[in-house]
Structures are given as C-alpha cells and as structure tokens.
Image (spheres, rainbow, N blue to C red):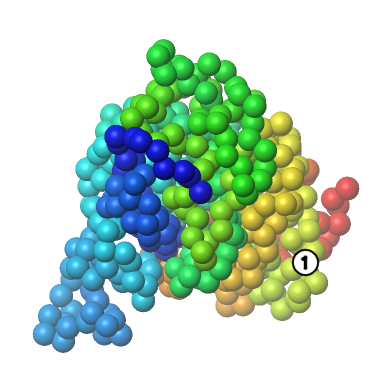
C-alpha cells in the first residue's frame, strides 16, 4: 500500500458512470478514500446519467404515501445511499455523491475512473473535453474495444487521446453483484504511463516497465510500450509535486479491499483486450448451453475462445499485449470463466437460444436497463477482421457474429470450430 508523505494536496476521485459495475466500483473507491483520507479527498463524485425512477414496492425505501411518484435517480442515490435501479439492495457509502452533471463531477479531480457501457463513452468523452485537469490520470473499467473502419484501439488509449491524459485499465473476473456483496474476488489493474519531465511537461520516453507482481511499486508514472499506444503522442502534463505520486502503489490503495484483491501490471493492452474479447466467448458459451449441450461443449468454446483472444492480442497489438496476461491474470482466463458461468452475456445468450428469440429482446426484457457489451463487441471485432480478410482465422469470433446475424445456427458451431488449425 502507498506510504504517506508530506504532500499539500490530496487526490480528488470521480467515477464516470453509475450502472451495475460503475456503482460497485464507486462503492469500493469511496470506502478507500475514507480509509486513506491522507491521500485522497474523502468525498467521491459519481456521475449519473439522469433518469426518473419509481421506487418498487419491494424497496425498503418505498413510501406508500408517495407511491408511484417518479424521482430523479441521482436524488434517490443521495437520499438513500442506494442505486435502486442498477445496484439494488446495496448500501453505498455516504461519502459517495451522485452528480448528474459530468462536467461538474470531474471538476478538480486528478483521478478519473471511467465505468460505463462502451456504447456511451464517445459522447461523454466529447462532453468532458476542456473540463478535466490537464494532469489528471484515468483508469478505464470499460470492457470493449473502440473500432473504426480502419483501426482498432483500446478505450484507455482512446479516452487518453481525447482528453490529453494518460489512462490505464482495470478488468478482471468481476461480476459486479458479487463484489457489491463483498464476496471475495481478484482484479487486474494495468497502469504504465511514460515518465514526464515535470519542467517541460512532456514525456521523456519509455522507462523500464514494472514487473508483473501484486507487490510491485513502480517509479511514479513509469514506462510505456508505444507499439500501439496513441497515448505516446500525447503531450502529458506531469502530476504536480504537491500531490502524492500516481504510481502502482497509490492505485492499489485506491482499489484494493479485503474482498477485492488487486494485482498491478503494466500490460494495458492485454488487460483491456481480455475484458472486451471474453464477452464474445461468453455469448458462444451461452449459445451452446442454451442449445442443451453440456459443460464439455462450453469448455470447448472457452478453449478456442482463449486461443483467439491471445492470437488477436499478438496479431494486432504486438508486443504491447503479453500472452501471459490472458493466461495468468484475473483479466484473462479467470474473467472468461466467470463470464461463461454467471455473466449477463452468457445468461442472455442462453435464454435467447432456449426461447428462440433475439438476444436484444432478452436484453430489454431481463436486464432492467443494464447493457450487454458482447453483442456490439462481436460486431465491431468482426468488422475489423473482415476489413483485413481475417475472419477465417478467428472461427469462434466469426461464428458468434454469424449466429447473431442469422447466417449460422448454434448447430453449426462444432463444424465451424473444427476448421481451426
Ligand atoms: N456489471 C458487471 O458485472 C460488470 C463487471 C465488470 C465490468 N463491467 C463493465 O463495466 C462497464 C459498465 O458496465 P455497468 O455494469 O456499470 O453498466 P450497466 O450494464 O449497468 O448499464 C447501465 C448504465 O448505462 C447508463 N446509460 C444508459 N443510457 C445511457 C446513455 N444514453 N448515456 C450514458 N449512459 C447511459 C445507465 O445510466 C447506467 O448507469 C461495461 O463495459 C461492462 O462490460 C461490468
Ligand atoms: O455480465 P457480463 O457478461 O457483462 O460480465 C460481467 C463481468 O465482465 C464479468 O467479469
């Protein structure tokens, strides 16, 4: 954990997003800012996409006098310290403040935690431009990849480029409800910014990467692999010396809880890709289980899925993504396993096949506003592979999009995967 020092400023933390995982991470962070108030401002801001919510009768906050009157979600959270829509039944810390204005929520924050469904980040990032501290640092908890017709990038890179800041990534075998109930889990945080010359305010080039260990303490802002990273093009501003340094130790202090164990690494690409690509594999797992096949079939798609995840990282992110991150860290194989057991992508895909309806219908009827990431990621990854003539090299990823779009059925999966060399 970070050691204390004589710093005149503390870090203010904002969580951008307040869904199922956004609210859970905000709870974790607010518990830690309170416990480490020498390093952080206790109060944590959480941006809420405002909506009107009616308290269900089953809620302990339901008042028969006001009955079905709709209230603003941010006001409900600040009154009852519960996100009754996206994380019902979980008490949130009172130092966590819901804020419907994203510009106001990030004001003066030196640590920005991005945690919202990936389809919404573009608009929010655009809205944030010019409102964040120039020396802020980010952590993206978003599981998805940003794809255009010509290229693919990580949300950490993309957010960083848009806001002119460095952004790392947090991802792991992390089903939010379990963690919100404080059931033990692990996660992986990748943070590896370039060294910044505090006088010039510019990166002085890559420094040695931190080794992959849960005890690692890097030099403040240490190391960048710029093979794929656009953040290498950013003129980063140094974090002023008045603040505690933003290094591995302080991020571990911010996120680690007795029930949420953090391993710090430097492979931002591997951590981000694991979280994005496993959602495609979870859909495939849901398909085969929904078809009535058993654990053997699920294990088969997971085996091929893991191989395709590693191959994808190697092929398109080169040395910036380490195979070991997929096989050794929570953000890789462990996340794939949990997602293929109890994740929303798995459950919705399974139900869609069982009921013979579209997965979009299941998402709408079953998730109460929560969003699947696997369906859009499958489409985005496919458009990227297709543009490069690489669909056949990724038979599982390709089978998933073809099933979603009706060109294949679940029954085709065994033959499609048999073609893999
Ligand atoms: N839920 C989990 O178990 C879990 C765990 C780990 C990682 N993740 C990842 O975390 C990210 C966030 O997921 P989540 O579970 O917090 O979200 P969610 O699935 O609960 O989505 C709902 C959120 O989207 C917001 N939203 C709806 N419409 C919006 C709009 N037009 N603009 C902006 N926001 C809008 C809602 O206000 C709400 O906060 C995703 O990338 C997800 O893959 C989720
Ligand atoms: O519910 P899913 O499928 O979005 O997965 C949740 C988490 O990513 C599991 O780690």
Please say if 199 is above or below 191: above
- In this view, the residue in front, 13 or 258, is 258
Say whether mark 1 is within 8 Å of ligand 2. no
Q: Relative to residue 152, is residue 361 drawn left or right? A: left
Query: Where, by quadrant of the figure, is residue 102 drawn?
Result: top left
**Label 1 crowd bin: few (<14), some (14–19), many (20+), radius 10 Å:** some
Q: Quadrant of ligand 1?
A: bottom left
The residue sitting at the left extreme is: 65
The residue sitting at the front extreme is: 6
Q: Is residue 261 visible?
A: yes
Please say if 340 is above or below 355: above
Q: Secondary structure at mark 1?
A: helix
Residue 209: x and y in percent read: 64, 31
Q: Is residue 147 visible?
A: no
Q: Residue at x 16, y 86 (%)?
A: 64
Residue at the disc numbered 1: 299
How many marks overall? 1
Residue 328: x and y in percent read: 72, 52
Q: Residue at x 60, y 22 (%)?
A: 206
Query: Where, by quadrant of the figure, is residue 128 drawn?
Result: top left
Q: Relative to residue 71, is residue 96 drawn left or right? A: right
- In this view, the residue in front, 116 or 41, is 41
Residue 19: x and y in percent read: 38, 60
Please say if 41 is above or below 61: above
Q: Residue at x 26, y 63 (%)?
A: 94
The residue sitting at the right extreme is: 421
Please say if 20 is above or below 193: below
Q: Residue at x 22, y 47 (%)?
A: 101
Residue 198: x and y in percent read: 42, 19
- In this view, the residue in front, 355 or 346, is 346
């Amino acid at each position: 954990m970070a050691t204390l020092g004589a710093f005149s400023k503390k870090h203010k933390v904002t969580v951008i997003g307040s869904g199922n995982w956004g609210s859970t991470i905000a709870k974790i962070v607010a518990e830690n800012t309170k416990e480490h108030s020498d390093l952080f401002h206790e109060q944590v801001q959480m941006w809420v996409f405002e909506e009107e919510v009616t308290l269900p009768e089953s809620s302990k906050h339901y008042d028969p006098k006001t009955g079905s009157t709709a209230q603003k979600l941010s006001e409900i959270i600040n009154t009852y310290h519960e996100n009754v829509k996206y994380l019902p039944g979980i008490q949130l810390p009172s130092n966590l403040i819901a804020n419907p204005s994203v510009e106001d929520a990030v004001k003066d924050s030196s640590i920005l935690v991005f945690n919202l469904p990936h389809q919404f980040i573009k608009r929010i990032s655009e809205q944030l431009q010019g409102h964040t501290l120039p020396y802020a640092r980010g952590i993206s908890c978003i599981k998805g990849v940003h794809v255009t017709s010509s290229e693919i990038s990580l949300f950490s890179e993309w957010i960083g480029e848009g806001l002119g800041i460095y952004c790392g990534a947090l991802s792991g075998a992390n089903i939010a409800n379990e963690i919100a109930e404080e059931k033990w889990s692990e996660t992986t945080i990748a943070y590896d910014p370039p060294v910044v010359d505090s006088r010039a305010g510019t990166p002085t080039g890559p420094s040695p990467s931190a080794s992959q260990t849960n005890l690692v303490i890097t030099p403040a802002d240490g190391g960048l692999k710029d093979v794929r990273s656009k953040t290498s093009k950013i003129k980063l501003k140094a974090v002023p010396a008045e603040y505690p340094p933003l290094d591995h130790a302080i991020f571990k202090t911010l996120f680690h809880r007795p029930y949420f164990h953090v391993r710090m690494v430097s492979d931002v690409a591997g951590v981000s890709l694991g979280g994005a690509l496993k959602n495609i594999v979870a859909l495939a797992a849901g398909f085969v289980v929904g078809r009535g096949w058993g654990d053997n079939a699920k294990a088969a798609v997971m085996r091929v899925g893991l191989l395709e995840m590693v191959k994808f990282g190697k092929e398109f992110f080169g040395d910036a993504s380490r195979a070991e991150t997929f096989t050794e860290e929570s953000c890789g194989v462990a996340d794939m396993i949990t997602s293929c057991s109890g994740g929303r992508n798995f459950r919705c895909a399974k139900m869609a096949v069982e009921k013979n309806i579209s997965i979009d219908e299941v998402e709408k009827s079953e998730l109460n506003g929560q969003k699947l990431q696997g369906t859009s990621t499958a489409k985005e990854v496919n458009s990227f592979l297709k543009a490069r003539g690489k669909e056949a090299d990724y038979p599982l990823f390709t089978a998933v999009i073809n099933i979603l779009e009706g060109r294949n059925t679940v029954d085709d999966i065994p033959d499609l995967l048999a073609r893999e060399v």
